[in-house]
Amino acid sequence: MQKIFYMKSKRTLYILALGIFGIGTTEFGVIGILPQLAHAFNVSIEKAGWLLSGFALAVAISGPFMMMLLSSFKRKGLMAFVLGIFALSNLLSIIAPNFGFLLAARILPAFFHPVYWAVALSSAANIVSEKEAPKAVSIVFGGFTIASILGIPIATLMADVFNWQSSFILYAAINIISFVGILLFLPDIPMPDKKKRNSNLSIFKSKILWINLFVACFIVAAMYATYGYMADYLGKVNKMNGKEISVLLFIFGVTGIFGNQLAGKFLSKNIYTTTLLFILSLVLVHILLYNLGTQFISIAVMMGVWGLVHSGGFLISNINVTSSAPESREFINSVFTSCGNIAVTLGTGIGGFWITHFGIHQIVWSSILCLLISFLILILKKVQMVKSQRI
């Protein structure tokens, strides 16, 4: 009986991950086709970048509010609805007559993005024991990792071989498949207790929650400060050509799958220690990256190590934040989604500032600075935890 329950739980986790895969591909897949879109709509690459940053900004703003607004709807139907909106958005993008229409079509699903993430991640944690929750959440997060490895490069390839519209056809197809998968195979998800839903805002009184949000924000910002400009760094600093960069990005992504799983296992044992080790490991990775030369083999090994460490950052940040309010998993996951998107915007902004003022080679120090800030906040968290235990 226990084995049957385990198998059903695993199937549910993979269905939820499929939806995350569709959403992640839609959000970040546009990165690979920005030049084609800028050319097609006769706009600058900076303006085309709003297709990504505008999406992230909408997610950051809408997160907790959309979850509160839609909290009374059945969870299975709600997730299917969100995936349907994503599919519709991509279909509208295909027929966009101008850039303004395309931007509006892109931003439309962003407002619903936090709802799926919040419900999917909280459901993953709720169907297993408290101890196994990080592993379960890591499986769902795996959908996002795979979107980075497969969804984005394939969409970019399709745009090169056919046209930019074919990329949006792919995004729409993935979301439609996810939509059908949710409807046919996902079991009904119990509604959270109404009293808990009504007391969501009270969680903001927790000092530990705010500390964890700042830790998460600076960790994710550190990740994206350098990662957001990875291709440019590899080309200008390490002198890699286009084909070599593609291979290196693939290596980074593949090791990332294992890194995500590894982070889940470590988190199941000790959240604080895992977070501390992650910060120190990522600092070391960036220092080694700074001192790399132009040899492809050494860079490939380094990219593999970087991907292994880097990929666990989102999961580690999520578990830190959600562990602050386990009684309000859905709401706190929507808060984390907003925090994560703000952090991505902050990190890429810091990275861009660093490149402008210090040069592309020095960008790793912007990540290290953010990591040191997160380390100091983590120490503050430990002090706060000790005080709470004494009381």
Image (tube, grey):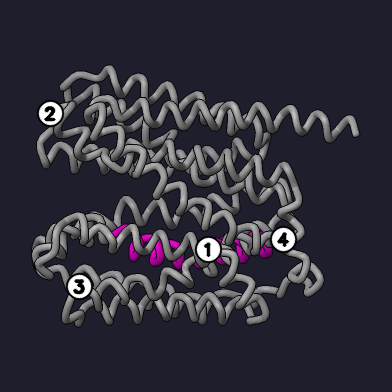
Which badge, 2 or 1, is on the more N-terminal residue?
Answer: 1
Question: Quarter-wise, where is residue 169 in the image?
Answer: bottom left
Give the mark nearer the N terminus: 4 vs 3: 3
Mark 1–mark 4 contact, CB under 8 Å?
Answer: no
Residue 95 coordinates in the image, percent (x, y): 20, 82
- Classify 294 as above or below 203: above
Please name the residue that numbered disc 3 is placed on: 99
Residue type at the position of mark 4: Ser
Mark 1: which secondary structure?
A: helix
Please give left or right for residue 95 compared with residue 268 in the image: left
Q: Amino acid at mark 1?
A: Trp
Q: What secondary structure prevails in the magenta region? A: helix
- Identify the residue at horizontal 15%, vertical 68% (top origin): 164
Q: Identify the disc placed on residue 150.
A: none
- Give whichever of discs 2 and 4 has the lower sequence position: 2
* Residue that numbered label 2 is attached to: 239
Indicate whether residue 39 is drawn in magenta: no
Find numbered disc 3 in the image and state the secondary structure of the residue it sits on: helix
Mark 2 is surrounded, within 10 Å at the Cα level, by few (under 14), some (14 to 19) or many (20 or more) other residues, namely some
